[in-house]
Image (cartoon, rainbow, N blue to C red):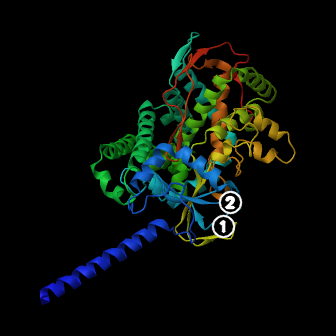
Amino acid sequence: MMTDLDLVLGKSQYALFCGITLFSFFVLKYSLLDNSGKKYPYINPKKPFEFSNQRVVQDFIENAKDILVKGRSLYKNTPYKAHTDLGDVLVIPPEYAEALKSERKLDFSEVAKDDTHGYIPGFEPIGSPFDLVPLVNKYLTRALAKLTKPLWVEASLGVDNVLGNSTEWHPINPGEDIMRIVSRMSSRVFMGEELCADDDWLKVSIEYTVQLFQTADGLRNYPRWARPYVHWFLPSCQSVRRKLQEARDLLQPHIERRKAAKQEAIAEGRPSPFDDSIEWFEKEYDGKSDPATEQIKLSLVAIHTTTDLLMETMFNIAIHPELLGPLREELVTVLSTEGLKKTSLYNLKLMDSVIKESQRLRPVGLGLFRRKALADIKLPNGDVIKKGTKIICDTTHQWNSEYYPDASKFDGYRFLRMRQTPGQDKHAHLVSTSHDQMGFGHGIHACPGRFFAANEIKIALCHMLLKYDWKMPEGVVPKSKALGTTLLGDREAKLMVKRREVEVDIDAIEGNE
């Protein structure tokens, strides 16, 4: 016979059962549906009743390239969903990137800060509210002509110092040594003559950059909700914070000397003696930005990616030594007839093609064109993605023969031939962006510093090509590695280099601008 207590317990258990069932229904519903307004299929779905996506995300981090190649093969010219190291994203085909390239309701800055943890202490250079884009467009790109000579001088000093004067074959570590050259060149423009040769500053900026990217990759192993808390206990995050403070302490005396020099100039009725990015930030943001944070930010976006592309280009030239002769011949011809100026770099067309082909085969990421919808957006197929949806465009088509003949093979002349083909010239330049080749992104959020990076890489290569021979060590083939959506170059591979006799005294060439 049932008592009142049995009835109460029975009702409670029934209510509990209903509650659990209802909760499970909603969890299952929202784990299977996306917020884009359409049931796009997942290329790497969770198992039924697998509420956490930790397993599929870890699998993506380890096998992203295969997963994205499979996704584009299965879904061709339509979007699909993926659980990734960047969160749940809608993966769009390249043709959609072309259609959406000017869509201002697709934001890049916020998604970039979130993906790279700009909200975490120590990551302030990523989360800084002071936008680089107007600074690059207003000051850096406009100054390219007058920066050619200073970059040329620093490249000469940096290359000679790092690669040495030995005429015997000796190994270098491109992952470290090329970064030292690029850091010196970039710092000459960003921070002036004094700091670009400061070994302590170059060391701390490089170490912070490397630590930050490694730590950011490691944080992606944790669920997004846990990252604002777990970072306090991670030694890697603590090290990043210490390194940023070290950079601030190192830069502060330099900033104080600059202030004194500016005040003296103003008192004497003279203009500021400085024309570098520290000065540009002060002008653009009324002195509200932290110099160390902004200089490290510039290092992150400029030095790391430029080093990566220059290193990959050197690897490809080493693997294809038949390019050395034509590259040097072009270089000697252009410099001998035109001298040193910005347009001379533009006319190094084979070099431009070799760099762009290197970027095609190994872009910095497997998922570029990263955006977040700030409002509902209509896709080219008529579907509507909801506000808050994150999208990426996979770059696997860059190795697809439907887009490029013999797409899996390196062809240093590929984009040089495109320049000579009517209608294709505008897409063949290194600094050109298109949905076919998105190494610098595409559309209104394409990398604004790509013009500076292109000049910097070409200037460094000018000195390396004329002054040095290089090759891969016997039996060594550099291999890229996918870590989630990031496509890493081979930082362990060495290069063998030796000094050579130059065809023209490259250090004596005068600038014409």
| Left or right: 421 as drawn, with respect to 33 | right
Q: Closer to the camera, 61 or 108? A: 61
Residue 276 visible here: no
| Cβ atoms under marks 2 and 1 closer than 8 Å | yes
Q: Quadrant of residue 223?
A: bottom left
- Residue flagged by tag 1: what amino acid is it? Leu
Q: Position of residue 382 (x, y in %)?
A: 68, 70
Q: Residue at x 49, y 46 (%)?
A: 484
Q: How many marks?
A: 2
Farthest bottom residue? Answer: 4
Q: Is residue 17 above or below residue 202?
A: below
The residue that mark 2 highlights is 96
Q: Position of residue 319 (x, y in %)?
A: 64, 24
Q: Residue at x 73, y 42 (%)?
A: 401
Quadrant location of the N terminus? bottom left
| Left or right: 3 as drawn, with respect to 219 | left
Farthest top residue? Answer: 168
Q: Closer to the camera, 16 or 256? A: 16
The residue that mark 1 highlights is 379
